[in-house]
Amino acid sequence: MSEIIRVAVSGAAGRVGQEVVRAVSRENGMELVGAVDVHNIGKDAGEVVGVAPLGVEIGNDLRQMLRETGAQVVVDFTSPRAVFDNARTAIEQGVHPVIGTTGMSTGERLELQELARQAGVGGLIAPNFAIGAVLMIRFAETAASYFPAVEIIELHHDQKLDAPSGTALKTAEVIAAKRGDHRPSMIEETIKLEGTRGGEFAQGIRVHSVRLPGLVAHQEVIFGGLGQTLTIRHDSLSRESYMPGVLLAVRRVIGSKELVYGLDNLMFEQA
Ligand code: NAP
């Protein structure tokens, strides 16, 4: 019989962190052993997320919690301001990080990947844990060979701190790499309202960010070609949508020695 995986959650009182606490605590083969946040300190994590008490008190010191609980994996859904230090702490403690928090710079990510390599502690940084979103990026990568013109519209709830979303950036990155050297339209546009045409990632790939209450996380990748368009759309309708991806990652990072970027690395590794 395989061993129970000891999981901790950072940002356990947050919107996604609460889902992770619920998902891990009811998952066979996993045990929630620790939780930290800057809110609800001293309260039982189960009570905070609306399930029966779990016997895990929410703390405010990640390093101490990891040391005391013997966690093997820490899932991080905190804030762009906290995630880099949290990940470094986990790696230093030999704990596999599974990071959902977005907003980290490329430089910070590369630094963490190097730290993880030196320490031999594998993990995952994923801009999107929704399996459907990972497939959307895969399908967009395929379409990019046939439809060079593309724009991305990402739509999120109005509490999101960073723009554009990590998923939109990852999608743009994958499309740009796939289609190679593409010359965008040279038409000179008259912009009557600053920002209307979105942000240009590279080579004419534009990204538009919509923020509204009522939304969760959505994205459209719209390709345009001769006499036709192709729209690939994904909707996360609730934060539960991230949980199958998070649980898959928790299982796969155990024993890994590389900090990979993107859930696709774990989903398609055996494909
Ligand atoms: P949230 O509701 O604000 O939850 C984050 C929680 O972490 C808050 O309670 C926050 O407190 C707390 N926190 C901040 N700094 C901390 C620290 N140093 N240690 C421990 N806890 C800390 O945000 P959310 O909606 O759950 O999203 C969290 C992050 O995940 C965001 O970056 C979001 O973009 C990202 N996200 C990623 C995915 C994905 O699939 N990869 C999906 C959804 C969201 P304060 O409120 O005081 O800051």
Image (spheres, rainbow, N blue to C red):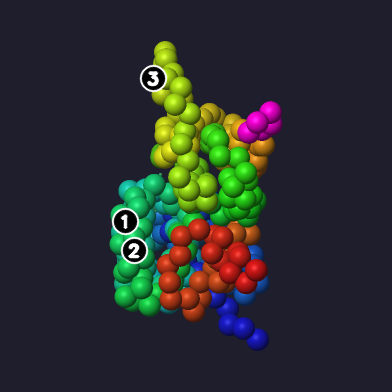
Local packing at callout 1 (Cα closer than 10 Å; few below 14, some 14-19, many 20+) is few
Report the amino acid beneath label 3. Answer: Glu
Closer to us: 82 or 258: 258
Residues under numbered marks 2 and 1 in contact, where contact means CB atoms less than 8 Å apart: yes
One can see residue 2 in this view: yes
Report the residue at 69% width, 31% height from top: 228
Local packing at callout 3 (Cα closer than 10 Å; few below 14, some 14-19, many 20+) is few
- For marks 3 and 1, give the CA distance: 30 Å
Label 1 sits on residue: 108
Work out which quarter of the rendered image holds the C terminus and state it. bottom right
Q: Position of residue 98 (x, y in %)?
A: 47, 63
Work out which quarter of the rendered image holds the N terminus and state it. bottom right
User: Of helix, strand and loop, which one carries label 3?
Assistant: loop
User: Which of the two marks, 2 or 3, is nearer to us in this view?
Assistant: 3
Of pointers 2 and 3, the one earlier in the residue sequence: 2
- For marks 2 and 1, give the CA distance: 6 Å
- Picture quarter containing residue 47? bottom right
Vertical placement of 187 versus 61: above or below? above
User: Label 1 CB, ligand 1: below 8 Å?
Assistant: no
Q: Which circle marks residue 194 in the picture?
A: 3
Outermost residue on the right side: it is 228
Label 2 sits on residue: 112
Outermost residue on the bottom side: it is 1
- Residue span colored magenta: 225-229
Residue 83: in magenta span: no
